[in-house]
Image: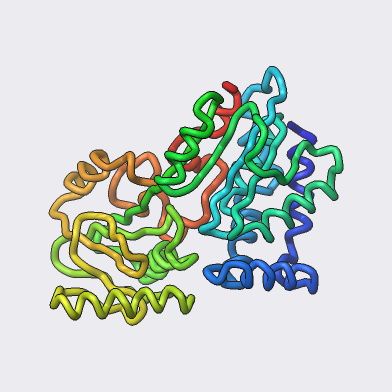
Amino acid sequence: MNRMIDSFVRLGERLEAFGRTPETVQIVRRAAAANPWFLPQEIVRSVEAIRDEMLERGRLERWASAYPPIGRRKEVLVITAGNLPLVGFFDLLCVLVSGHACRVRPSGKDATLTEYIVGLLKAIDPAIPLTISDIQGCPDAVIATGSDNTNRYFRALFGGIPSLLRGSRQSVAVLSGRETSAELRGLEEDIFAYSGLGCRNVSLLFVPRGGLPSLRCRADNEKYRHNYLQERAVLRMRRLPFVDLDGAVMCEERSFPAALSRIHYTFYDTPAEAEEWLAAHDGELQCVVSRCVRHSRCVEFGRAQHPRLTDYADDVDTMRFLATI
């Protein structure tokens, strides 16, 4: 465990200038060319968030010390999604720090960045039990993330081995009406970062009855804007009410939107009403941005896309899963 922590700390040191050296500028360009949803500045932001939250020695040591050593090393296949840059990094980190061997099957939408990180780790420690692989062969366990349809395929494919399989989730913000301008700018980041494609992106707002917050669309991707123009045209054609953010639309519905550039909002009368809805839909939630309600996965405004080592996806402790295989 200590050896793995040393390797990841050194990885953080090597990523300190990511996006500012000729080599890493080329990596960013290649990743953005391979996936037009990845903007160069958001690729850099993703790497910086990983460095800040997951690769600092003190944080790694405190986090890892909460788990007992494993009895025997197993081979774990990690199948990553491709909706966000390096979205599968934390699973890779968990597998290696727990003491297991990791086979990574990167999404074709994020292969450039994943292969770059794997190459850095192998250069830091050639003996690290980490390889790029396909899904052939028979691993001892699997961690996979994808859509709900992909999740059903994984359940059929890996039904006989220990599996941690994740499908689609959504995130919510509950406002008190007393948010500062800085908190509202943070909420814009929570909504629009990475073109709203992550499960931690807020897509539903609970707002106290009486008025909507003043928000600005901060999605810069042209593909996202095309979605917005299409959704706005459909709403106008159907004569449905909406708030135009000049880049996204807001509609009053107490449900998660299906369209990428569409944000839903709903009014509530008491915080207890919002908490009751959150409890009833907990299985659909990834995180809740708020400072006025209680929830096990509450985060501060502007921090939804900065998960910490203890912010496990779907509220399932990945390290405890790895200890049981």
Vertical side of 288 occupied by 30: above or below: below
Whole-percent x and y of residue 51? 66, 55
Name which residue lies at 85% across and 38% down.
127
Let me know if residue 62 appears in the view.
no
Whole-percent x and y of residue 29? 68, 73
Vertical side of 120 occupied by 309: above or below: above
Horizontal relation, residue 89 to residue 18: left or right: left
Horizontal relation, residue 175 to residue 268: left or right: right
Give residue 191's quadrant in the image: bottom left
Give residue 92's quadrant in the image: top right
Whole-percent x and y of residue 160? 53, 24
In front of the other: 162 or 120 = 162
Whole-percent x and y of residue 137? 67, 33
Horizontal relation, residue 64 to residue 225: left or right: right
Quadrant of the rendering where the C terminus is positioned = top right
Name which residue lies at 40% across and 48% down.
168
